[in-house]
Amino acid sequence: MKVLVVGGTGALGGHAALHLAAQGHDVTITGRGAGAPEGTALTTLGFLQGDYVAGDFTPDRLRGFDWMVFAAGNDPRHVPQGEDFGAWLHKANHVALPAFFAAAREAGVARAVQLGSFYPQAAPELVAGNVYIQSRLAACEGARAEGAPGFDVVSVNAPFMVGTVPGLPSAIFDPYVQWAKGNIPIPFFAPTGGTNFMSFQSLSEAIEGALLRGEPGKAYLVGDENLTFRDYFQLFFDAVGSDVVLEARDEELLLLPDIAIPQGRGNTISYEPDAGETALLGYRRRDVAAAVAEIAAQFG
């Protein structure tokens, strides 16, 4: 199939794009920059420049693709400096994202996967008090609302993600590895609480499964392992061969600030993905430690 991966120059979209290409699909990625990141296998894929928030992707530009993966939903990292936080997320996720899916429908795309966040499904009590989570819920519902006969839209809602694209820098995982190696002077502790984690590989398999077998209009809550933050960060120390044993503290960690824990430090989001849905989508489980080992090998 001819597949367009929106946000394919990023980590999750890039991994999904390479996974789909490895399965024999003709994959094109999009990005706001001038091309795919140098030093990665993403440069071997087709490239379409554009910004969905700016309305760059008209139906004419999307015509000819059979499938689409949307992995470009905006989060706090994408809010431009000087822009109002809530207003930007509303513009990007409430308005521009459904409009993009409408353009894909008009272009004749047959199936699309919207990659979203797990919070609205796994912790719906957080929606009312969090503008970001509200915007991700709106994106999930808005994308699927654009589905129609001949245009199947499926959402795959993922938890904390763990993994790497070979050659792609990471402002998250490189510091984790350097910290575990003792190269960053941050005390050795992890905040209390925890969440569900999932590897890039598992997610890419779930996205592929959703394209192949997903029920139109369905929102799938995917995930893998429930871990405390202490146990999660300990995986990085173990992967680099450190003998440090982390402790859990009710204290903010610079590498995982409180703003990145919507449920609040000390609290846990824990769930088991539906077994039938996991089998349908066909993604692997118990893969987080393997993903951390890959990260340590790349950045160590």
Image: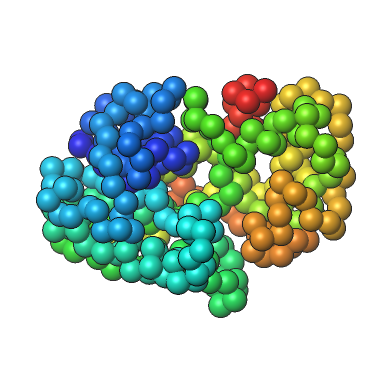
Residue 31 in view in this figure: yes
Q: Is residue 39 above or below residue 121?
A: above
Residue 94, how many percent across, how many down?
A: 38, 69
Closest to the observer: 67 or 48? 48
Q: Extreme front residue here?
A: 82
What coloring was used for the rendering? rainbow
Report whether residue 134 is seen: no
Residue 259, located in which quarter of the rendered image? Answer: bottom right
Q: Is residue 4 left or right of residue 218?
A: left
Tell me the residue at 63%/36% (across/down). Answer: 173
Is 72 or 276 nearer to us in this picture? 72
Looking at the image, which residue is at 32% across and 51% down?
51
Q: Does 211 appear above or below 78?
A: above
Identified at 44% across, 66% down, the residue is 88
Q: Is residue 64 left or right of residue 95?
A: left
**At x 66% / y 54%, what residue is drawn?**
195
Q: Quadrant of residue 21?
A: top left
Placement of the N terminus among the 4 image quadrants: top left
158 vs 281, nearest the viewer: 158
The image position of residue 157, as x and y in percent, is 46, 55
From this view, report whether residue 101 is shown above or below residue 186.
below
Residue 155 placed where, x, y %? 38, 56
